[in-house]
Image (tube, rainbow, N blue to C red):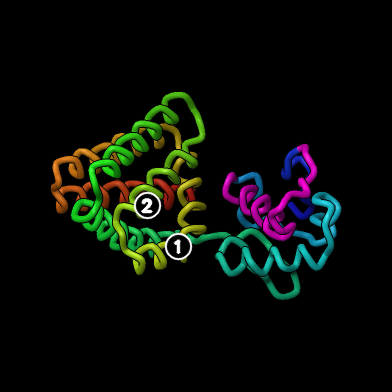
Amino acid sequence: MDVVSSSVWGPEPLPRVAAPLREQVTDRVRAAILDLRLRPGERLIERELTENLGVSRATVREVIRQLAAEGLVTVVPQRGAEVTSLSASDAADIYEMRASLEALAVRRFVQRAGEDQVRALRAAVDEIARSAEAAGDHLAAKDRFYEVLMEGSASGPLQQTLAGLQARVRLLRATSLSAPGRPTQAAQELSAVVDAVEARDAEAAADACVLHIRNAAATATAQLTG
């Protein structure tokens, strides 16, 4: 599809609030991509964006550059910007990187997190389970789980490295969670991670984390190749 409908962006105009307008537009376009309202391969036409979002072409170009840097948008010569289409092989590489990095994050969490942070991680996984049962905002619940995990790992290098993958990881997460039954399965897998964390068993927690990521990888790659 070459023309992006205004319904993609929601019914309300962008508010003129304290956050810079460019950040507001970036957040809105990023959300449309991550929520799969803009599909992989869909073109981002500057004229359509300026009309639908009520901003200048200069702002749109800045937003496209930012999202390209995050890996969510690809600029194709002679065609322009489009939502990034991740191949199955790209997805496999990203998931393998996630498995290694997040397993280390879980080990550090077990070693460094306080009891309040462990309780917050359990509360986050409980919210994931509720969102799976009630068809709620599962992506937001998972974001909260990983926020607590990263904070409790107390590792700046890990947080910075994972931040570089975050946008593409979240796009793949949206892809895998769109498979029937996957949200409930993911909630169960993450609950097993927290069980091991509460037992202060770093290796069991890391193993459970890797299993969760590899199951997500299998689901996402099946979606990408289906």
Q: Position of residue 152 (x, y in %)?
A: 30, 52
Which span is picked out in magenta?
11-35
The residue located at (18%, 43%) in the rendering is 196
Q: Amino acid at mark 1?
A: Ala
Q: Residue furthest bottom?
A: 77
Q: Is residue 206 above or below residue 115?
A: below
Q: Position of residue 212 (x, y in %)?
A: 30, 46
Q: Is residue 112 above or below residue 132?
A: below
Provide the residue designation for mark 2: 217
87 on left or right of 194: right
Residue 163 has which mark? 1
45 on left or right of 106: right
Q: Nearer the viewer, residue 178 or 49?
A: 49
Q: Position of residue 154 (x, y in %)?
A: 31, 59
Q: Is residue 16 magenta?
A: yes
Discs 1, 2 touching: Cβ within 8 Å: no
Q: Position of residue 155 (x, y in %)?
A: 31, 63
- Quarter of the view holding residue 76: bottom right
